[in-house]
Image (cartoon, rainbow, N blue to C red):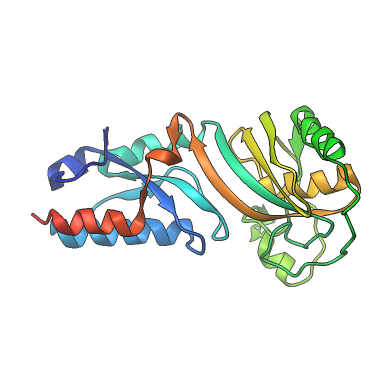
Amino acid sequence: MVIFEEGLSLEEYREGVLILINKPKGWSSFDVVKKVRYLLQRNLKAKKLKVGHGGTLDPLADGLMLIGVGKATKQLFTIQEEDKEYVARITLGATTPSYDLETEVENKKDVSALSKETIQAAVNSLLSMKEQVPPLFSAKRINGTRAYELARKGEDKTLESIKITIHEAELLRPDLPEIEVRIKCSKGTYIRTIANDLGKIINCGAYLSGLTRTKSGHYELVNAIELDKFEEKIILHKV
C-alpha cells in the first residue's frame, strides 16, 4: 500500500493508495469519500474506482481521516481497529441532549469558581473508565432503527454499554468555561460521552464543543493534506 504523493498513475491507485486527509468541520465522512472519489475518477479518467475510509468522523469534528483507494480499501478494517487520539474541547457548566453542539445548550451553571486541581482530578479519573453508554444521538441501532432518529422524535431510550479503554488523558488547557483535553482511546469510543461524563464527575455538566482527531494508529494529522490542497495536486497531474 502506497501513501499518497503527487503524480501517481491510475494503475498505482488501483493497486492501493492510502490518503491522509485533514477533514474540515462541517463535512461528513461520506462527503469526504465522495469528493476524493470524484476528483480521482475525473482526473484519472476512471469510470470506477474503489474509495473508502478508515473511521468515521462526525460532521462537527475535524482532523485526520484515512482514505483508502483501490486495494487499500481491503486494509481499512484493520486500520479501524487501531487506537485513536483526539484533542477535545469541552465546555463546562452546561449540557446538551446530544452531548455536543448538534442540539441546544441547556442547564447552564456558573463554573468560574472551579479550580484547576478539580478539573485535573476529573480528567485523571477518565483513565479508570472501562465502558460507556453511547449517546442516543448516534448511528447505533435500536431494534433496527438508528438511535438518532428516535432521539429526534423525542423518544427516551437507553443504549447498551460498550467496552472502551482510555490509554491517555491529558489536560492541555484548563481555561474556563472551555477546557482542552488530549485523549488516546480504543476504537469506537464516543468522545461526546466522555465530555458528558466529565461534567457528571465534576457535578457541573459539560458538552463537547469541538473535536480534532490527531492520530489513527501510527498515522498522524501533521502528515495529512487539506482537501483543497489535495484537489490542487490532483488537477496539476492529470494523465
Position of residue 101 in the picture relative to residue 115 (left or right): left
Residue 46 shows in the view: no
Q: Position of residue 65 (x, y in %)?
A: 44, 46
Residue at position x 68%, y 33% from top? Answer: 170
Q: 109 or 21, which is in the foreground?
A: 109
Counting labels gives 0
Can you say which quadrant of the picture contains the N terminus?
Answer: top left
Residue 109 shows in the view: yes
Residue at position x 44%, y 36% from top? Answer: 220
Position of residue 131 in the picture relative to residue 215 (left or right): right
Position of residue 198 in the picture relative to residue 16 (left or right): right
Residue at position x 82%, y 39% from top? Answer: 116
Q: Position of residue 4 (x, y in %)?
A: 26, 41
Q: 76 or 31, which is in the foreground?
A: 31
Q: 142 or 227, which is in the foreground?
A: 227
User: In the image, is residue 129 above or below residue 153?
Assistant: above
Q: Residue furthest bottom?
A: 153
Q: Quadrant of residue 160?
A: top right
Q: Position of residue 199 (x, y in %)?
A: 83, 48
Q: Quadrant of residue 141?
A: bottom right
Residue at position x 71%, y 68% from top? Answer: 103
